[in-house]
Structure formats: structure tokens, C-alpha cells
Amino acid sequence: MSIFADETTRLLVQGITGREGSFHARQMLEYGTNLVAGVTPGKGGQRFEGKVPVFDTVAEAVAATGANTTVIYVPPMAAAAAIIEAADGAIPLIVCITEGIPVMHMSRTMPFVRSRGVRLIGPNCPGLITPGSRAKIGIIPGNICTAGRVGLVSRSGTLTYEVVNHLTRAGVGQSTCVGIGGDPIIGTNFIDCLRAFQDDPGTDAIVMIGEIGGTDEQSAALFVKAHVTKPVVGFIAGQTAPKGRRMGHAGAIISGSSGTAEEKLAAFEAAGIGIMRRPVDVIDLLRKRM
Amino acid sequence: MNIHEYQARALLKAQGIPMLDGDVASTPTEAEAIARRLGGTVVIKAQVHAGGRGKAGGVRLAKSPGEALDHASEILGMEIKGLTVQKVLVVPAAEISSESYVGLIMDRETQRPVFMVSSAGGVDIEEVAQKTPEKIVRFPVDPTYGLFPHQALRLALGLYMDFGQVKAAAKIMEQLYAAFVANGASLAEINPLVTTPHGRVLALDAKIVIDDNELFWRPDLGLLRDETAEEPSEAAARRANLSFIKLDGDVGCVVNGAGLAMATMDLVKYYGGEPANFLDIGGSSSPEKVINALKIITADRHVKAILFNIFGGITRTDDVANGLVAATRQFKVSVPIVIRLTGTNEAEAIRILNAVGMTALSDMDEAVARVVKLAKEAA
């Protein structure tokens, strides 16, 4: 069992003929992901790697292949439009890898995504992977993951790989690893993932990797305290980051917080979340709790 | 991207927001000339990308052009939070009856631009937010429609009793929202928005932060960047497409990914060292990026040892290895380098390094402990 991706996943790749899209589509195929279609406007009718059909639009791809998940690798200026096209095509799970989308674009995109009742993961995220179903959606290296019962959710990319690598080397497998992305506006947050892991019979414990900035980790800690019965361990990157030369007051006023590591770790502590001082600590902390 | 107050003023002025005329000076004599032209008492304001200018002594009143010259001489070249003041803004001193705060920020939680308005404006607005949050009115704007006139009016009604001033403030709210959208801002702030004894409503200060992601398709906004106001090594890194922040320690760090870069700094500290920098070479790291990263780090004389921490996903570790070899051929690196590589094309990377007598570790803790030890020995 897992969250968001499993053996029923039928994956579409938007931007499949581009440099990033084609490279990662190949990696996803190699891993065993059920990649059923690609979309690149103007390239409809082609076949990717001689087998995956390419369409001009998401609607055509969905009609022809029954795709139920899409992953977006289109450049930043077209990425919000690609998310909207996918949502308009009623694809239940949209994963956007693209980095560099203007925040104003995302602010206008999210209400539309919500209106269609679909889930967006990202943008600016590494995607997700369910090793037990050989379902890799995004760019998380498949070879560092192994099937198991620990769920992982993270705001980071390579730091996620570091922690997953420690888990796998210690023989601790993962149900699903999700990178939610580091942008100010994202489609799926920590709480969404924590709730899904809590409800997933295939997940026994949860690893949460946060960063300085914002208040998502603090809200997630409150959620853990109130609703999560499974053991949770957490890490906050940026414990030694210097205080910025912050301009303006609005950031501090809106959040009522400076988003420091200390604040986030205190919230973890108060929620009974096991605190990793180093990435490698994940193993001992999990073993003590499982 | 931060821009200066004088630049933010120009962007707000372009939308019609009322403010007093002023001008920017790079030398004391320029400041004197502006003060003479404006006449009367003026304010000399340091133009620097840091908050707390007033409290640092970077904002002063001058009653005559001569005083303007003196104050500008003192402020120009002054250091505020590690940044040297290169320019001052000279504006007429306003007579102030009341000070309000109007801020607009792209909010993570509501995922919308949110207005924050308070009749208790001024430098202590953050204290107001903490102690009496009810004095700050928040209003999220639906970005699909923008700010409607009746919404602007409601925000302004919270500030003033006089309806003439309410109407003027409502117009300013709409103009501020227009400036926010037109310039791809993540923050736009007027603090204070003042009323004068004659009943006018004026913006006395302006702050705008532009969303870096807008710059790619808005080269006009990129022109507002003032490289002289940045830490020189940070400006060089940005030109090389590297994300870099200079710190005070002696362990140089080259890492792929922001989260891992921060975790690496944390680990350096955990093992008793002090990081010299934050440096993220990004996802697709070409050998050139590695060369540029090494150039920037070795230019810092405090650096006693350098750590490469690369977890290859999109990043190919052989690219990094090739960059390392090329860099050490181009220029002499006189401090020890500890390399940690794992992930995509790791075997090839290790072969490349071994061929020139370099070695790599695969464990992050081991690499960090080693680089901290080397830095201590060299200190």
C-alpha cells in the first residue's frame, strides 16, 4: 500500500519530447512506471521510444489512454498553463516538477485546480515514488529507494535522497516518498501528506523533512499532535542559516513568525515528533519508535 | 530581488500614488544640490537592501543644504548590516499628522496577495503586530479579479475619519495593488502612509520586493538590479547561476540542492566547524558551474578547507568530477578539498577523480567530519 501512486497509476508526461521530459520519461520507463502517454503540442502522432503515444493535448491523451496521473516538465513560462490544462482534463493527480514559475501565476492557478477537485503536487518538486508498485512520478532516483512501510514527505529534493538513502542502506523500506516542493504556493502541503499516510494501512511510520521559512511545519506539528497516531520523526534544514537582511515588515506580520529552525523544532518537540539532528539519525529514531 | 526605496518610489509613482518629490544622490555634493533645489528641511535616507536603516543611523534630517552635505558624507560609505551605503535619497521633510501602514504580500497560506492595513504605522509596526494584532486589518485579494473599489474603500475606512482622506487612501490601495501586479512583486509596502496637517495623504516610504521568477520574462525588471548594493561574491555567483550566501566561517561548501546545502552547513556546525558559505550549484550542474563555484569560494581568504557534497539525481556526479579536475588545472587551489559524491554516474566520477590522484567519500557524515578537522588543523 501507499499514497497517491500505486499499481493503478496510468501516467501521462506533459513535455515528453523536451530535454528534461524525455530524459526523465526514459528513467521512469526503466524503473517500471506504467507510462501510457505523452503530450507535446505539435508532436501529436509520434511515439516516444517507439512505444509511448504522443498527443497534442491532454484531453486527447486522456480519452485515448485513460491516463489518471500526469507529470509536468514544461518550461516555467508555460507550466501554469500546463497545470490548468491537466486540471481541465480532470486528471486526479497532477505533479509539476518545473522550477521557476512566477508566484503570481500559481496564485491564479490554484483556485482553478481546486475548482476541478484535483490534486496538484508541486511545483518545483522532485515528485513522488512508490517503490512497492514500481511507480516513479518525477525525478527521485529509483535505485536509492526500496519497498517498505515508512512514508516520507519533504520540502526538499536532494536532502530527501540523502534521507531515503540512509533508510534503504539500513534496510528500512518506504511506502511512498513525496517531495512537496519549496515554492511559496504549492498544491499539496505537509498536512495533506500526513493525513494520507495516517490513513494508509501500508504505512507504519512517517518521516517529515522541512526547512526554515514559512509556518507549514508548525501547522503540520499541530496536526500530528491532534490526528496522527503513527510515529513521526522530523528534520529541519537551515538550523545554522544566518538571519537575513530582511526588507519590509509584511512577511513577519502575516505569519506572526520568523520561520526559524528553533520555532519549528520547538513545534516538533511539543507534538512528540522525534527530532533528527543529522539526516543519519533517522534510523535510530525510527527504530526506537516502531 | 530587492530594489531600492528610490526605485520602488518610481514604480509607485508610475501608478499615480502621491508622494513628495525627491532625488537620489551618490555623492555628498549631489545631495547638497538636491537639498538646495528642494528647499527647506530635507531627509537624507540611506539606500541599502536591509531593514532597520533608521535605527542604524541611516536616516537623518537636514535643515540646510550644508547639513545635507554633512549628513550625506556620513551616511554614504556607512555599513548597515554588512552592506555599504552607495546612494542616498533626499526628500523634503513632511509635516505629519498621522502614520499608517499599508502592506501587500503574496501569502503562502491563503495563496493570494493579502493586504495588511493599520492606522498604527511607523517603525514599530512589527511590535504592533505582535502585541495588538487586532490593530492590523488583513484582506486577501482574489487574484482572478483583483481589488474591487468597494474593497479598497472598506480598507481605507479603517484608517481615517475624514471621507476625503478615505477616498484618497482607497485610491492608493488600488494603485498599490496595480503596482504589485504590474511589477511581479512578492511584497509592496508603504510605511508610513501619512496625513499632513493640510489633510493630504502621502506615501513617505516605499518598499518593493520582486519575485525572482518574474525576471526571466521581464528583463525590464532585471534592469532595476543594483549590483553595487550586493555583496560582491554574491553578485558574481548570481551571474554564474549559482545560489550563494557568504557566511563568516572557514569551511567552504559546494552542494547540489538548497535543502542539502543547508543540511550540510548544519552538519559542519554539528561537527564543531563553521561554514564559510551557502552554495547551491543547482540541478543540472555543468563542469563550468563547478569551476565558477570553486573560484568564488577560493576568493574568500578565510576558507581553510572546502567540502563538495553532491547527491546525484539530475545532477551527474561525473560532471562535477570533470569540473573539479578542470578547475584544479586552471588555477591552484591551495586549501584541501574533501569530496563526497554519491548517486548518478558515481563510478565514472570516482574513476575521473582517481585518474588525477583525487579521492571521494560516499558518506556525508564522514566527509563533513574530515573537512572540519582539516580546517581546524589549518587555522
Image (cartoon, rainbow, N blue to C red):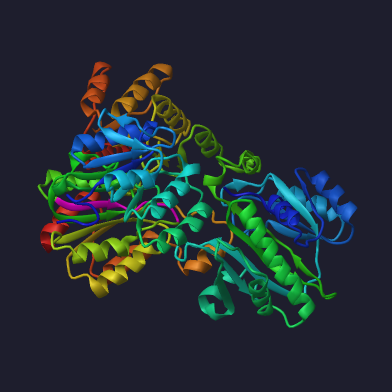
**Residue B261 seen in the current view:** no
Question: Is residue A253 found inside the magenta-colored segment of the image?
Answer: no
B12, above or below A40, in the image: below
Q: Quadrant of the C terminus of chain B?
A: top left
Relative to B76, A56 lies left or right: left
Of A41 and B65, nearer the camera is A41
**Residue B121 seen in the current view:** yes
Question: Is residue A176 found inside the magenta-colored segment of the image?
Answer: yes
Relative to A119, A247 lies left or right: right
Query: Where does residue B187 sit, x and y in percent of width and height?
Result: 58, 58
Query: Where does residue A182 sit, x and y in percent of width and height?
Result: 39, 52
Query: Where does residue A232 sit, x and y in percent of width and height?
Result: 21, 63
Of A202 and A289, nearer the camera is A202
Q: Which residues are magenta?
A: A174-184
Query: Where does residue B8 sit, x and y in percent of width and height?
Result: 68, 53
Residue B256 sits in which quadrant?
Answer: top left
Of B203 and A21, nearer the camera is A21
Of A168 and B42, nearer the camera is A168
B112, above or below A93, in the image: below
